[in-house]
Image: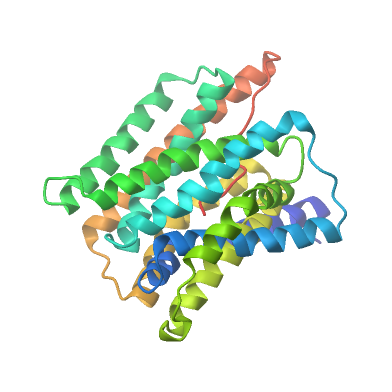
Amino acid sequence: MTSPSLSRERLGLVLGFVGMTIFGGTLPATRIAVSAIDPIAVTALRTAIAGLCSLALLIILRRPLPPRRLWLQLVIAMLCVSLLFPFLMALAMQTVDASHGGVVLGILPIATALVAVIITHERPRPMFWIASIAGAALVVAFALRQGGGAVSAGDLLLFACVAVSAIGYAYSGRLTAEMPGWEVISWVLVITLPVSLPIAAFTIPADLGHIGLKPWFALLYVALFSQWIGFFAWNAGMAMGGIARVSQVQLLQPFVTFALAVWFNGETITLSILLFAAAVVATVVISTRTRRDAAAVASRDDTPAWEPLTQGTE
């Protein structure tokens, strides 16, 4: 018979895989959406729809307002996760393939860890820094190779995506020590409503009938799943299966993005894309494990260690 703890861990892995798969579809869906809808409208509509759903859920469950001491962190997470990241991604998906973006965003776990190191004043082992620099160098080399020796505007936008998302995820992860992960993302989206709703109303396309069903479905996907529901599955999986174990599932995300980009966007995945993605994943594994080992040592020395990997790559 399977023990309850083992069953809980397995369910956590399943939920983590579901969340990771949802996030893996974000780039292909965004590329479809921006092919027919303005990036500003996509961003505003995506955030507004998710925000209204979040508000309804919080009201139904009668959740109290977060403590005032947490509002600054919520605002920082809101600016990065709900506004800047989706907007920069939408702009980037106008000029680069989803599979290309999957490789560049594969470095996001390392970037998030770097922000966490700065916030918590950790002192990771030298191997963490070596792996982080190697991962960044690989992504830059990939961008140069794909751009014919120059970094394209789309790559610059993706680099900015990584930076703002890392900050947002780090602060969101910090907030999960105070409230459940689903509640963090829900409050972040609700706080965004005063900005997202007016922009959505102002930028929504005039001729809605001229936009096909595929872009609309893609918009609904990034709004309901990438921006909101994916966090429910991901955070629940982390809570049930353990952060250290379930977070490893995220290493598969670039390859999920590749598969979905081929299926829905008709993109071609070359051997070089696969090799660069695998190399980036390897640097993520090394940096994550060395930082976690250092955090474990710090914990034994009675120094609080905080793990930021409680948010997925949306």
What's the residue at 44%, 53% (across, down)? 87
Colour scheme of the picture = rainbow
Q: Quadrant of the N terminus?
A: bottom right
Q: Where does the image place residue 126, in percent across and percent down from the top left?
A: 41, 19
Q: Where does the image place residue 182, in percent across and percent down from the top left?
A: 71, 52
Q: Where does the image place residue 311, in percent across and percent down from the top left?
A: 59, 46
Q: Is residue 275 left or right of residue 129?
A: left
Q: Where does the image place residue 296, in percent across and percent down from the top left?
A: 62, 24
Outermost residue, left side: 148
Residue 61 shows up from this direction = yes
Q: Is residue 282 left or right of residue 269?
A: right
Identify which residue, 168 or 273, lies in the foreground: 168
Q: Which of the 4 image quadrants contains residue 172?
A: top right
Q: Is residue 165 left or right of residue 176?
A: left
Identify which residue, 303 or 197, lies in the foreground: 197
What's the residue at 50%, 29% (across, down)? 115
Residue 26 shows up from this direction = no
Identify which residue, 33 or 289, lies in the foreground: 33
Number of callouts in the render? 0
**Residue 271, relative to residue 143: is it above or below?**
below
Outermost residue, right side: 62
Outermost residue, bottom side: 209
**Residue 156, relative to residue 198: is it above or below?**
above
Q: Which of the 4 image quadrants contains residue 310?
A: top right
Q: Is residue 259 left or right of residue 66?
A: left
**Residue 148, relative to residue 118: is it above or below?**
below
What's the residue at 51%, 49% (across, down)? 83
What's the residue at 68%, 17% (across, down)? 300
